[in-house]
């Protein structure tokens, strides 16, 4: 549904990698210079057939599901949607950008 609504050609692929806190921490340290685990990381390749990769820490997703009082599955979905919008060029570096990104994500999470 994201591909259709956001006008992403269906020929573009996204690799989703489920990983541990340890693995995502290493990626976060190597690519963002933040030596801590995070919940989701996106790497945009912008190749003709590969939009990018989304890494989701299942350990973080499980902890956050409990914290937010949602199901594990809905938290993984939220992280996937969030990662997709990073691949599509959105970020949350400023409060304005964060609000815009949340508005884009919300129809896919209802």
Image: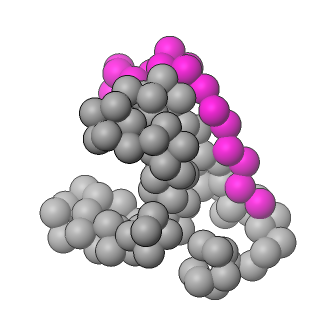
Q: Quadrant of residue 75?
A: top left
- Residue 83 x %, y %: 51, 53
Q: Give the extent of the magenta segment.
A: 13-37
Q: Quadrant of residue 52?
A: bottom right
Is residue 26 something that shows in the picture? Answer: no
- Residue 71 x %, y %: 45, 41
Residue at 71%, 55% in the rendered image: 14
Residue 58 counted in the magenta span: no
Residue at 35%, 21% in the rendered image: 36
- 68 versus 90 height, above or below: above
- 72 versus 37 height, above or below: below
Furthest toward the left, the residue is 95
Camera-side residue of 46 and 75? 75
Camera-side residue of 75 and 91? 75
Camera-side residue of 45 and 67? 67
Is residue 78 something that shows in the picture? Answer: yes
């Amino acid at each position: 549904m994201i591909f259709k609504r956001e006008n992403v050609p269906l020929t573009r692929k996204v690799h989703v990698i489920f990983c541990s806190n340890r693995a995502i921490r290493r990626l976060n340290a190597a690519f963002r210079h933040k030596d801590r685990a995070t919940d989701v990381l996106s790497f945009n390749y912008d190749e003709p057939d590969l939009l990018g990769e989304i890494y989701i820490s299942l350990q973080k997703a499980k902890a956050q599901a409990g914290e937010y009082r949602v199901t594990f599955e809905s938290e993984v979905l939220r992280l996937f949607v969030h990662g997709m919008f990073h691949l599509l060029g959105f970020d949350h570096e400023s409060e304005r950008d964060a609000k815009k990104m949340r508005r884009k994500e919300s129809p896919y999470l209802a």
